Image (cartoon, rainbow, N blue to C red):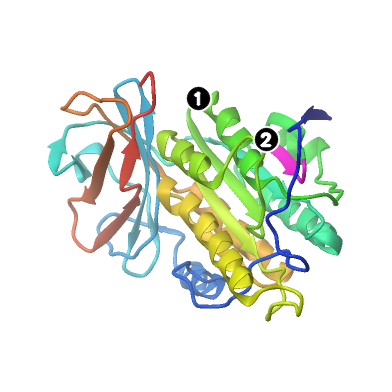
Amino acid sequence: MVRAFIVAVVFLASIPGVGGAVRAQQRELPTLRDEVKASTTRQSSPQATTATQQRQNQDDVIRVDTNLITIPATVMDRDGRYITDLRKEDFQIYEDGIEQEVAWVAPVEQPFTILFLLDTSGSMGYRLQDLAAAANAFVRQLRLNDRLISATFNDTVQVQWEATAVKEVLDSKRFRLRGGGNTLLYDAVDYALKRMKKVEGRKAIVLFSDGYGSGVFASEKSTLRKAEEQDALIYTVQFDTAPKEPPRNVNKKYFYDAVERADRYMRDLAQRTGGRPYQVDTLSDLGQAFGLIADELRRQYSLGYYPKKPLETGQRHEIKVRVRLPNLVVRARDSYVVAKGK
């Protein structure tokens, strides 16, 4: 087992007795119930329809390689079914309100490299066996030519295996998780972003955590900034491990502020990269959440264009991706930040 140690004066941002996100107020994240409902609609119809059919909604991503911008995009009809037969001329891309020339569109069959990042800190406790089962089920839903990196984290990051073809993972590897320790969430996300920066082609990070944590070398702000500068989709699956009310020895304002911060971080990581945030209240829902992510990864286009205006470090650019055909909706990242050296 390769270990990527994150050293440490470790402090835990979680509240005493609180390991996960309490539902103090209703958030903007899509609920698993909404996703399962959409999935059920899809399962009663063909999994993918032709471009002459209609629409619905989802979210997605972008990349910056020198002057080339690539944007993973998902297209759906109004019934929530994926549209997988579009061509380059069917898309329009606008940057800062100016239409760009679509340079290429990669078909949905192109494989992904996925980094599976699992929180195994003390707050996960006895749930690790169920998490391992859900993770193994997730792998079985990927394409055989996709590649998977597996890493867990608590007060260190442990890489279980490096990029490995899914076929080989199914033949020889299984998730076996050990828990305990604090939650260096921000350092773990920072590690994942640095690791995926080296990966070519389509890539995604799937993060499972309750959203509570801290960082020694990284912070909430620094990781969100790095995520916007990179081209990896991030899908977050947030598991509720908190009590419904603050423990008696915990200040109520501190408790609810921590809950809101955890929710916001998991939501922002996904939405700023074009991925999707999920919340699950029970581990029995985990398999469904992971299944919806795997399903979406199998049905994404990659669009590429060269911006008409020069790129300047630190600039934020707004993006709008549209489809020329009626009654279809495309989900794609809506902005990016130019990193140094790009």
Q: Considering the numbered disc 1 on the image, is that residue within a helix, a strand or a loop?
A: loop
Residue 128: x percent and y percent?
Answer: 82, 57
174 with respect to 56 (left or right): right
Q: Nearer the viewer, residue 129 or 246?
A: 246
Find the magenta span and give its range. Answer: 149-155
Tags 1 and 2 touching, CB below 8 Å: no
Residue 331: x percent and y percent?
Answer: 34, 53
**Residue type highlighted by circle 1:** Glu
Residue 270: x percent and y percent?
Answer: 48, 52
Residue at figure coordinates x 41%, y 40% from the top left: 228
Q: What's the distance in space between the residues labelled 1 and 2, CA to CA?
A: 14 Å
Q: In this rendering, is residue 41 above or below 159?
A: below
Q: Considering the numbered disc 2 on the image, is that residue within a helix, a strand or a loop?
A: strand
**Which quarter of the rendered picture does the C terminus lie within?**
top left
**Residue type highlighted by circle 2:** Ile
198 with respect to 54 (left or right): right
Residue on which disc 1 sits: 200
How crowded pointer 1 is (Cα within 10 Å; few <14, some 14-19, many 20+) is rated as few
Locate residue 116: give its quadrant.
top right
Q: In this rendering, is residue 235 above or below 250?
A: above
Residue at figure coordinates x 17%, y 51% from the top left: 324
Residue 168: x percent and y percent?
Answer: 74, 33
Q: Is residue 275 visible?
A: yes
